Image (cartoon, rainbow, N blue to C red):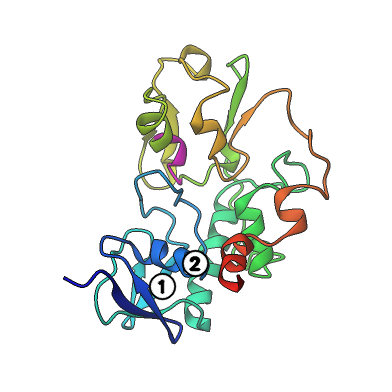
Amino acid sequence: MSETIPITIDGVEVQAKPGQTILEAADAAGIYIPRLCYQKDLVPFGACRVCTVLVNGRPQPACTQPVAPEMVIDNSSEKVQTYRRNIIEMLFVEGNHFCMFCEKSGNCELQALAYRFGITAPKYPFLFPKREVDASHPDIFVDHNRCILCARCVRASRDVDGKNVFGFVGRGPHKKVAVNADANLGGTDAAATDKALDICPVGALMRKRVGYAVPVGQRDYDTKPIGSDIETSKAK
């Protein structure tokens, strides 16, 4: 059996390893595929679909689709970019993302993707859903206004922290992250040191008393576009 699987991404031949997903193979080759729900070291979930690529002409989530011989992958055409731009815009209008006031601004992956895609104002109407903030825990809080249902906290709490603090309840527009306590977050064994806190891509799950510690202008995506770390590795 060959040790590598040749695939083509945007006209460039890439030698992928058996068992890799398209996204993993692209990362290794220095080709950035935008993503939100994907997080290295967590089981891929395929929830956000921002990583959608065209595989031999068919849309597929790059984070869950394994590589296979003779794959021809479109990661950059206008058609693909439109898919992603539409998804990102829908995530903005489905929640309440007041970036100018959010302490995650500059470190927020959703905001950074909007910058990367040149989105200044979504073309869809804002829904302005009524959502609550759970600040019952002494050290952390959940702001459901900014949650994008990526399940990173769900997977990290279950698979890394070993606590199963977070999970989903409801369906459709009523789906939301809930906690494994009868009342609220304060009744769980969640801790500020949990991995689930580190990997929230937006400002939905935050630590108290540390907001704005890094000034605006010095945060991760104030100085470099999201994905540039992967693309830089290609240039080396």
Q: Which residues are magenta?
A: 150-154
Q: Quadrant of residue 164?
A: top left
Element carrying mark 1 = strand
Q: Quadrant of residue 129?
A: top right
At horizontal 58% and vertical 16% (from top left) the residue drawn is 137
Q: Position of residue 107 (x, y in %)?
A: 68, 47
Circles 1 and 2 in contact, beta carbons < 8 Å: yes
Q: Quadrant of residue 113?
A: bottom right
* Between marks 1 and 2 in the image, the one whose residue lies nearer the viewer: 2
Tag on residue 75? none
Q: Nearer the viewer, residue 92 or 46?
A: 46
Q: CA distance from mark 1 to mark 2?
A: 8 Å
Q: Position of residue 14 (x, y in %)?
A: 39, 77
What main secondary structure does the magenta stretch of the protein show? helix
Q: Nearer the viewer, residue 7 or 62?
A: 7
Tag on residue 33? 2
Query: What is the residue that sits farthest to the left in this orientation?
Result: 1
Residue 83 lies in magenta, yes or no? no
At horizontal 42% and vertical 61% (from top left) the residue drawn is 49
Q: Which residue is mark 1?
A: 53
Query: What is the residue that sits farthest to the bottom in this orientation?
Result: 11
- Along the polypeptide, which appears first: circle 1 or circle 2? 2
Q: Amino acid at mark 1?
A: Val
Whether residue 134 is visible: no
